Amino acid sequence: MASEPASHMLTGWAVESPGPIMDGPLRPVRRAVPSPGPGDLLLRVEACGVCRTDLHLAEGDLAPHRASTVPGHEIVGRVTAVGESVTAFRVGDRAGGAWLRSTCGHCRYCRAGQENLCPASLYTGWDADGGFADVALVPADYAYALPDDQDAASLAPLLCAGIIGYRALRRSALPPKGRLGIYGFGASAHLAAQVALAEGATVHVLTRSARARELAVELGASSVGGAYDRPPEPLDSAILFAPVGDLVPVALEALDRSGTLAVAGIHLTDIPVLTYRRHLFEERNLRSVTSNTRQDGRDFLATAAQIGIRVTVSPYPLSHADRALRDLAADQVSGAAVLVPG
């Protein structure tokens, strides 16, 4: 195993007792720096994005898979040690750790290129400690090589917000130069919107946040409105990023015939009763989005580099991770919140 010597304890945050974010479910922790096992990378974290999934885990919307887990799955870092059998990365390389952490590789879904549906899949910050810390372990086979010449804080949101937004866009079956509605406009949405715009789509943004509506206009949205407003024209496709089930019938009603709504979140409040004629007739489609494949990640990162994607970042020191989650819960974050170790 090649390595640089570890000079400190791991310093970070863990979800000790899930509950309302204002009650402080996140607690500071200090632990021994982990050693990379076979196939692992040990990263010195340069930045870690704050995802709404981290908020769902902290508040208990997603049941914890293990006690006292360090959240965070948009990890940008420098490799400080590599485990046995790692050949794709060396000490000093910049690498990214994302939500999807491992899959079995042999089930029917993995064999069919649908590893995001693998029943044995594991996730960073849920099944293993993540990046709300100054060091993190990442499996090399699920890590992404990242450019050296870009700001770490701007790269971090690409690793989940970007990848999941990209998969949601593809799941929405947006036709060439189609009309896309985006419900909720946070980290994922502001990145997916740029991909759609670069591909010639007309984008309509519907969100409760005035700050997010301003950002949508800056990025080139054709219209902005409140979350429950009607877009100015029928939609070919829509993506629901807000974790609000009440918006499912709203978005379905905004679709044109044969339109598709993709629901992007891992957690959603209950969906009201749908009426067949009003919401689904005329071949309207309702789809979910579950995690991502590594190919999604590679495709999105290549696309982001090609179009020169603009990442709007609200940086927080690692010591303020609890405040970052509170601000996210209150819709007080413009673009993506990112933790930066000091």
Image (cartoon, rainbow, N blue to C red):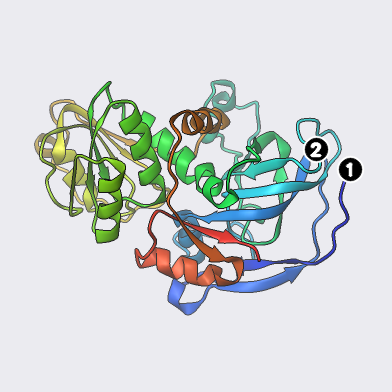
Pick out the residue farthest to the bottom.
Answer: 23
At 44% from the left edge and 70% from the top edge, which residue is drawn? 326
At 26% from the left edge and 54% from the top edge, which residue is drawn? 214
Asked if labels 2 and 1 touch by Cβ distance under 8 angstroms, the answer is yes
Viewer-closest of 174 and 76 = 76
Q: Tell me if mark 2 has few (under 14), some (14-19) or many (20+) residues whose alpha carbon lies within 10 angstroms of its own.
A: some
| Depicted 293 relative to depicted 129: above or below | above
Q: Position of residue 173 (x, y in %)?
A: 31, 26
98 relative position to 78: left or right = left
Element at badge 1? Answer: loop
Residue 187, label in figure: none
Q: Tell me if mark 1 has few (under 14), some (14-19) or many (20+) residues whose alpha carbon lies within 10 angstroms of its own.
A: few
User: Identity of the amino acid at label 1?
Assistant: Ala
Q: Tell me the residue that label 2 is attached to.
A: 90
Q: Position of residue 202 (x, y in %)?
A: 22, 32
Q: Tell me the residue that label 1 is attached to.
A: 2
